[in-house]
Image (cartoon, rainbow, N blue to C red):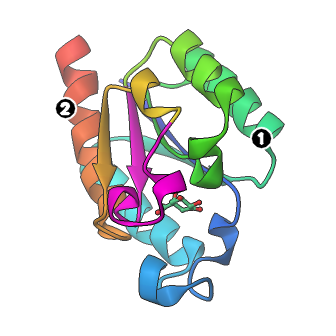
Amino acid sequence: MDKPVAYILNGPNLNLLGSREPAIYGNESLADIEVSTRNRASELGLSLVFRQSNSEGAIVDWVQEAHSKAAGLIINPGAYTHTSIAIHDALIAAALPKIEIHLSNIHAREAFRRKSLTASAVDGLIIGFGAAGYGLALEALRNLIDKRG
Ligand code: DQA
């Protein structure tokens, strides 16, 4: 049987991980995170699509694509978390298990980061565990996929 497909979508400026504010986001690059997340996906029996874009429209397109092609979705919308009704609406329309992830604890930072417009459109959130959060999110997604059969 084919492995269930998990989409991991990363939003703006996450391509700069490793050099961008390492005290907040850590020293691992997005490529490093992709490698460790691919290893975890294969341990969990998931096939992984891992992408990043700085463009809100691309992320909306990919959420729509995940709706037809994936068994589950993990998204770090970056700063669009706090602004994007379009990504919120795309997530609502995508009827599959969904998890929002943030490297940093957005609730312990500036006031404008404490509100997530996308959080109400997902099943659960993994926040503040740095790069390790991606593996934790995959594990949680695998549980959700299994529960929904
Ligand atoms: C982030 C938190 C956002 O507030 C910020 O704009 C990001 C990264 C995180 O992973 O901690 O770009 O999503």
* Residue 22 place in picture, x, y as percent: 50, 88
Crowdedness near tag 1: few (<14), some (14–19) or many (≥20) residues, C-alpha within 10 Å: some
> Which badge, 1 or 2, is on the more N-terminal residue?
1
- Residue 82: x percent and y percent? 58, 44
Q: Is residue 132 above or below residue 46?
A: below
Provide the residue designation for mark 1.
Answer: 56
Extent of the magenta region: 98-116
Report the front residue among 23 and 66: 23
Q: Where is residue 111 in the image (x, y as percent from the top left)?
A: 47, 56
Verify whether residue 103 appears in magenta.
yes
- Residue 107 visible in image: yes
Residue 145: which quarter of the image?
top left
Left or right of residue 79, residue 41 in this image:
left
Whether residues under marks 1 and 2 lie with C-beta atoms below 8 angstroms apart, the answer is no
Q: Is residue 72 left or right of residue 42?
A: right
Residue under label 2, please give it.
143
Quarter where residue 128 is shown: bottom left
Q: Give the residue displayed 50% in from the left and 77% down from the top.
A: 32
Q: Amino acid under label 2?
A: Asn
Q: Is residue 89 left or right of residue 58?
A: left
In terms of depth relative to the viewer, which is nearer, 86 or 6?
86
* Residue behind label 1 places its C-beta within 8 angstroms of ligand 1: no
Q: Does the magenta stretch include residue 87?
A: no
Question: How many numbered badges does the structure rendering display?
Answer: 2
* Image side of residue 110 versus residue 83, left or right: left
Residue type indicated by callout 1: Glu
- Mark 2 is surrounded, within 10 Å at the Cα level, by few (under 14), some (14 to 19) or many (20 or more) other residues, namely some
17 up-or-down from 63: above or below: below
Instruction: Specify the farthest residue to the front.
Output: 111
Query: Mark number for residue 81?
Result: none
